[in-house]
Image (cartoon, coloured by chain):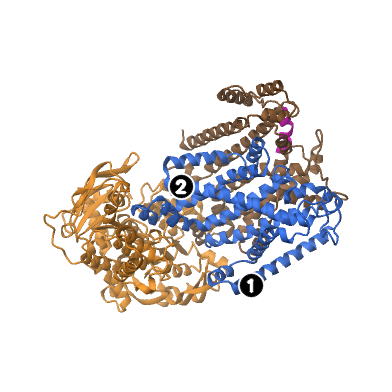
Chain colours: A orange, B brown, C blue
Amino acid sequence: MAEKNVLLTMKGLRIEGRADEEWLEIVKGVDLTLHRGEVLGLIGESGAGKSTIGLAAMGFARDGCRISGGEILFDGIDLRKASESERRALRGKRIAYVAQSAAASFNPAHKLIDQYCEAPVEHGVMGRAEASHDAKELYAKMQLPQPETIGFRYPHQVSGGQLQRAMTAMAMACRPDLIIFDEPTTALDVTTQIEVLAAIRNIVEQFDTAAIYITHDLAVVAQMADKIKVLLRGEEVEEAETRAMLDAPSKDYTRSLWAVRSYARAAQAPVRDATPVVSVRNVTAGYGTINVLTDISFDIHARRTVAVVGESGSGKSTAARVITGLLPPRMGEILFNGSALPPDYRRRTRDQLRQAQMIYQMADTALNPKQKLRELIGRPAQMYLGLNGKALDARVRDLLRVIELEPNDYIDRLPSELSGGQKQRIGIARALAAEPQFIICDEVTSALDQLVAEGILKLLDKLQSEFSLAYMFITHDLATVKAIADEVVVMKNGVVVEQGPKSEMFQPPHDPYTELLLSSVPEMDPDWLDNLLAERAAGGAGAKAESAGN
Amino acid sequence: MPHIWTMILQRLALGLVTLFVVSLIIFLGTELLPSDFAQEILGQSATPETVAALRAQLGLNDPMHVRFGNWLADVVQGDFGVSLANGQSVSALIGRRLGNTLSLALYAAAIAVPLSLMLGILAALFRNSIFDRVANASALTAISFPEFFVAYILIFYLAGAGGAFPSMANFRGEPSFGDYLYRSFLPALTLTLVVTAHMMRMTRAAIINLLASPYIEMARLKGMTPMRVIVRHALPNALAPIINVVALNLAYLITGVVIVEVVFVYPGLGQLMVDSVSARDMPVVQGIALVFAAAYVLLNLTADVLATLSNPRLVHRR
Amino acid sequence: MGFLTGLLWFFAAIAVAMAAGWLFRKGVIAVAPRGVAKEMRTAPLTASFGMLMILIYILVALSAHWIAPFGETTIVGREYEPWGNVHLLGTDNLGRDMLSRLIYAARNTVGIAFITTALAFILGSILGLLAAIVGGWPDQLLSRAVDVLMAIPALIFALLLLTIVGTSVVNMILVIALIDSTRVFRLARAVAMNIVVMDYVEAAKLRGEGLWRLIMREILPNAMAPLVAEFGLRFCFVFLTISALSFLGLGIQPPTADWGSMVKDNATLISFGDITPLLPAGAIALLTVSVNFVVDWQLHRASGLKE
């Protein structure tokens, strides 16, 4: 591409962040070149520095960060040498930013349309009336419902997916040369994500805007970017055009990111005539006057994993609470090895409590930060199995070995000294310490980076065969379901929409919701989004109407 | 009716209920009197007849709910009973002094509120600068000083022999406005200093909290000038927390007034209350406690309602 | 003493205070075990100074009996003698030695304030923690009751209760402890509510842990930091309230030495240009400032860095 088409270059960019009293380097010499109309995907795990680099492209550093070295040239303007007012003149007008959480980034005190018009009016690009008119046009382009009037609402009156699109429209207001998208769909449900991705792609193409698309999701970046740059801990790993990188990544780290989605558990023969370890029978449960679950039933057998899938509000976590006895059901019952469990956990015997254990999603809230690992893992063993003294110590060490952590190094540490993946392993060890028959995994990999998540899944798999465990795996991520489930239960709004063996679930015919869910999971094919949109436009005005409600 | 008004009515109702329960507690004060209270008041030389008469006068013989009903009815009509010390009508005693205390509080508030809001906002905007650190340390020091310490220091330097202001604010009758301001300057200044310190710190904390919000960063990323970010983005959302801060501290003024009035011999409710407590003059103490408590409840209620009205999330529902 | 000389002394005092704080911090870092030294390094000068003063106050309070030159209530001279060689700070309105009374008052006022704060704290935090854990109607009941009690301004309520029960030291301690425990309840409950929703508390409940273990092993260790800071703040408030009440003549009664009442008794000296009555008031202020500086430092660290 010709030189005059280069919009943004970064050479040897270095950024430092402050931790307590010292400055540590977060970004260690990154180079970047972006041409007009080009979309660059910045991908990496948490801590890779992608957000920080994105903000640096606007000459901005958050509180506690500073740009310490390198050069940033935007259309010939040196951003580091420019004055603050020169940089301000660029921001919002020629370089725009779309934040991760639209709900937090819109001012709750002003209407959407006022916030849209602010940038063009203050930067002198358009008058108020013209900007207002433009807003409505863009809202329509973004497929927002009632584009003529939605601008007159306040942010808290609009749903998450709609806000994200409104934020993208707002970024376009001054027709900038470059937009920075900072994980715009990470917080959204998979079905909502499609709408937003399509809208972003459309508008970027229509106005021929250059974009930097930041995400940790490989399949998403494959849909949106012309070229991809992989980052690890503040340094570049590799960069290539999208198709080239997908077909043949050259670095090991890149390849390992790709490999996660291809992990799959060995297929299991279906169970015949055995009493299920846990049986949920016609359970209806709720709070106050509302029912969160309505007449759900499923069985979980030993050595099998049942994945309970659904989006937010589907009731999957509530099902776990009913099984553990935290929420007694209004109707129905829970059977354990054939006999009914008391609905309230306070009425269950210690042995009944021991048999069913739970692993939580956020290890930070699941482990008491003031207790050493020795106590965290040892307490269940002490309470349920009556172990003490030397026997207890030996058992704790055994468990640490099982979760692949060296006992001597870790036994006296506090959770704050561990990484996210290690903390999750401790959660697993704590569950194992009780020697249960059944473990509920509540979104245990949802908060982890993909590589780390894969490690956890492999460990859980190994433990299941070694200890003959039955798993109930709650998740919203279909890729994980594909990887580890034997049976699948799909839930929506408290009802079981479809359930059955995994092999059946991933083949048509489906319940329309399952169809929607399955098709909304991005795949590693750059054309996937285009194909999907074409399919949906042709195949179902119905499906589209259902999903446009987001 | 729009839901916001329902919400406000609910708050008002809650305020009234609180007031009722508070008055009940204050009334119960008489109930908790040791049974020979009448005896104690009259002293050793009291005869059984005078004790019985006093008990009858205090209404200690009727059943409790009757007494409470009577008392409440009286209070609502403005009759707080009669002082045990000098036989005067309690409401007359209070009435005279209530105006004085209110003026003093208003005098202090008029200076303190704008001053502390300004200082607090500036400190938040220039946080960690020298100005901020000094302001913070000074405020922390000021709130640690007992009011009488501040009062006496001011008297030491600004009053006494050769001082500019009078050390005692015991005016009689109705002074002119200018004269009033002059005589009450020192007590008002004492109150102002302590209240300003509290308010400044709280305002600073609230604004700093606000400035850390993502939408403030977003405004900056849209290239808005710092002035516009503060005025159009931060301030509209700062109303609710600032109203809360001001209300909390105005309520604090009510208690600070007591010490100040004693030190400066200012003819207000605070001084009357202290004297009555020493004399165990129950009706007066009850009356003043009720007035103070009512003011406190009303202030908090107003703050609550104002904060609700200035929160767009509550005014415009989904 | 003139205004300018006063101002000069004031700035000199600040300089000395900062220097003392700096030296104290250096000293502690040098001799303390690793964990404590690490904490001290983050302490600003104000907090170091505060810690130093608190230690001095505690020492004086504990050793009052041995270091005071004269008795607490013994009359040793004429009234209002000026500062001299025998009586370093002169005598008070009844002819007792000022310095000795100042020292004894440290023991009395600080001691009583501490006991009152401890009482308020124990009552308020136990109820607050229980309310958060048990929830349901006991929580509602307690919270409503506390709301109502807090609707009456603290000083007014104290005065009201003291009118009823009479002004003695024991009554004052109980009244202030009761009133202050409501503030502690609010805070303890709020802190505990944040902890009770954590997954590890749910996990402990599912294990069948009893209430005692839940409080002692799961909740309390995670609530310590804000609770300890609150203890400091409550101490300041109680200390100032007791001094105010004593100043008004409604608190610690004569002849017990107490800073608040000492100010009141000797107030006439101020109109003669003698700053002696400001000394006990200054003693109150100095301790409160010190505690406030230390608590502020801890709160600043705990809140993370929004700054």
- Helix, strand or loop at label 1? It is helix
The CA span between labels 1 and 2 is 42 Å
| Residue in front for this viewpoint, B53 or B263 | B53
What is the three-letter code of the residue carrying label 1? Answer: Gly
C255 up-or-down from A268: above or below: above
| Residue in front for this viewpoint, A156 or A124 | A156
Residue C64 drawn at (x, y percent):
71, 58
Q: Quadrant of residue A458?
A: bottom left
Query: What span is in magenta?
Result: B92-102
Q: Is residue A315 magenta?
A: no
| Residue in front for this viewpoint, A100 or A173 | A100
Q: Residue furthest right?
A: B162
Q: Which residue is mark 2?
A: C130
Task: Name the main secondary structure of what is drawn in magenta.
Answer: helix
Q: Is residue B96 magenta?
A: yes
Residue A97 drawn at (x, y percent):
45, 62
What is the three-letter code of the residue carrying label 2? Answer: Leu
Q: Which residue is mark 1?
A: C27
**Relative to residue C16, is residue A344 drawn left or right?**
left
Subunit under mark 2: C
